[in-house]
Image: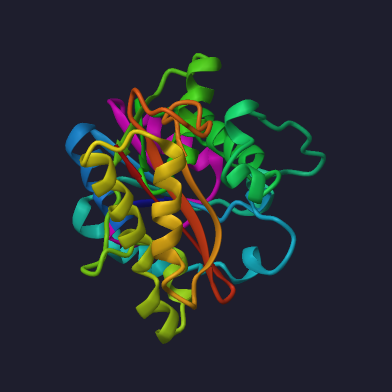
């Protein structure tokens, strides 16, 4: 496993290892969700690269960027069983050199849901993912379904810009009680951790209504909200029943639906979704 902190070192290593490359972009603090993507990349490519970079341009002002866990040594230990070939862990100066002024903006699909709650977030995501695609030039890139809007934005960007990379989406990995695995779960207090599985229960309640034949988005959203309101520690930011491609809220559901939500527990913000 070769650790590259400079783009020039990464490219020199890749030049010596021709073949198909799979890229798993991460911000580190790896968990089983990330590792499931690494395993899939290992199975489907000659070589695997994992980027570990906490991208400052996708964070709003405040302390979230500074407190985001940075555990590179632990992350590399977790990757060893999967025979990762290349770890790319650049500095901010390497990724955003002085006088940097070029950003990638995806329009309509970034406006609802997370885009409405986190202005500028997806500009940072689209920019860093484009840079990683240009640096690594992977044949396939692997993302988790838990960040459903991020996946949709990246798929849109790849189509629009004719980027020669296949986007592979892995299923959301969950704890035994249903909580979606996330690097931010470590921020939860013991009480909030016990309360947090309410997200998945709310999604399952709406899923069950859908499976019983409910096709009205205006009926599914209250189902989720009513379950969440049973948990006093849960502060709901939004619930959504949206078109899986455009992320626009649906009334009549004809071709599937993305159920999603964002909920705060104290200062910790969690997201989750189900794609039906």
Where is 116 relative to 62, above or below? above
Indicate left or right for 134 with 144 as reference. right
254 or 273: which is nearer to us? 254
Residue at x 28% of width, y 40% of height = 210
Where is 153 relative to 60, above or below? above
Q: Quadrant of the C terminus?
A: top left
Q: Is residue 26 visible?
A: no
- Single out the residue that lies furthest toward the right: 99
Picture coordinates of residue 25 (x, y %)?
A: 43, 44
Where is 75 relative to 249, above or below? below
Asked if the stretch drawn in magenta spans residue 168, the answer is no
156 or 263: which is nearer to us? 263
Picture coordinates of residue 53 (x, y %)?
A: 53, 53
Residue at x 61% of width, y 54% of height = 91
Picture coordinates of residue 115 (x, y %)?
A: 62, 42
Which stretch is magenta? 4-32
Asked if the stretch drawn in magenta spans residue 23, the answer is yes
Indicate left or right for 245 with 160 as reference. left
Residue at x 40% of width, y 23% of height = 165
Residue at x 34% of width, y 33% of height = 215
């Amino acid at each position: 496993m070769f650790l590259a902190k400079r783009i020039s070192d990464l490219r020199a290593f890749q030049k010596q290892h021709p073949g198909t490359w799979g890229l798993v972009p991460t911000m580190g603090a790896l968990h089983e969700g990330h590792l499931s993507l690494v395993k899939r990349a290992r199975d489907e490519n000659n070589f695997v690269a994992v980027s570990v970079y906490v991208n400052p341009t996708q964070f709003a002002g405040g302390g979230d960027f500074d407190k985001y866990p940075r555990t590179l040594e632990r992350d590399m230990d977790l990757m060893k069983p999967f025979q990762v070939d290349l770890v790319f862990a650049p500095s901010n100066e390497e990724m955003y050199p002085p006088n940097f002024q070029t950003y990638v903006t995806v329009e309509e699909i970034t406006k609802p849901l997370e885009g409405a709650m986190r202005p500028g977030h997806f500009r940072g995501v689209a920019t860093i993912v484009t840079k990683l695609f240009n640096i690594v030039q992977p044949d396939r890139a692997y993302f988790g379904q838990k960040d459903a809007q991020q996946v949709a934005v990246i798929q849109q960007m790849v189509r629009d810009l004719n980027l020669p990379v296949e986007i592979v989406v892995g299923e959301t990995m969950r704890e035994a009680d249903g909580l979606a695995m996330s690097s931010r779960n470590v921020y939860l207090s013991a009480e909030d951790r016990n309360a947090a599985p309410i997200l998945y229960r709310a999604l399952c309640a709406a899923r069950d209504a859908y499976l019983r034949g409910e096709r009205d988005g205006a009926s599914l959203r209250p189902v989720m909200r009513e379950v969440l309101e049973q948990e006093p520690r849960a502060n709901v930011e939004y619930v959504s029943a949206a078109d899986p491609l455009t992320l626009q809220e649906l009334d009549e559901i004809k071709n599937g639906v993305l159920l999603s939500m964002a909920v705060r527990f104290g200062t910790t913000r969690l997201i989750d979704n189900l794609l039906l």
